[in-house]
Image (spheres, rainbow, N blue to C red):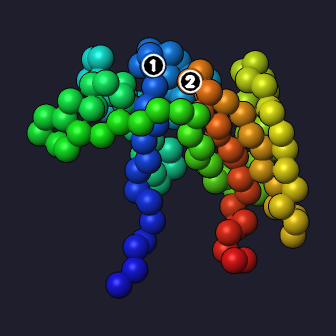
Amino acid sequence: MEIKKIKETCLYVSDLEQSKAFYHGKLGFKVIGEVKDRHVFFRAGASVLLCFIAEAAKKGGHLPPHFGAGELHLAFEVEQEQYTLWKQQVEGQGIEIEQEYDWGGGFLSFYFRDPDRHLLEVVMEGMWERS
């Protein structure tokens, strides 16, 4: 047996409208689900990014409760040919790039923060296939 991929990942945010303005408005992710004062979900390529208000998700309901806090990290993979375009897109939206890193073998990534200070990374496709 083998896991095929991580289908969705979750961030806990303080303001859904602020998160929507960032992930949809600035990064261009399509909104695929939304419940006022609880969550907003985005399409991120073949994956889904879930943004929850922690206190709302902590209450549970028809699904088990979950929550978290702190500055979490996740990475978005892009085609190598689109890496520079994504970097320009992020910078063009007035988002500070904290660091760019050369992983060797021609693979680069860059780091930036969302409004809740989660550390986001854009990585070139193929980086982990060599491991």
Q: Residue furthest front?
A: 69
Q: Disc 2 vs disc 1: Cβ atoms closer than 8 Å?
A: yes
Tell me, for residue 14, which label it has, or none: 1
Location of residue 36 by image quarter: top left
In the rendered view of the protein, which quadrant contains the N terminus? Answer: bottom left
Q: Residue visible at 11% across and 39% down? A: 62
Write the residue at 87% across / 56% down.
Answer: 102
- Kind of residue at badge 2: Asp
Residue 83 % position (x, y): 77, 48
Q: What residue is at 74 percent from the left and 40 percent from the top? A: 111
Q: Which circle marks residue 116 in the picture?
A: 2
What SS does tag 2 mark?
Answer: loop
Measured in 3D between alpha carbons, the distance from the residue under mark 2 to the one under mark 1, in whole angstroms, is 7 Å
Q: Hey, which quadrant is residue 91 in on the image?
A: top right
Element carrying mark 1: loop
Residue 36, compared with residue 44, is above or below; it is: above
Q: Residues within 10 Å of mark 1 (few under 14, many from 20)?
A: some
Above or below residue 129? Residue 51 is: above
Query: In percent of the image, x 78 and y 50: which residue is there?
Result: 109
Amino acid, disc 1: Ser
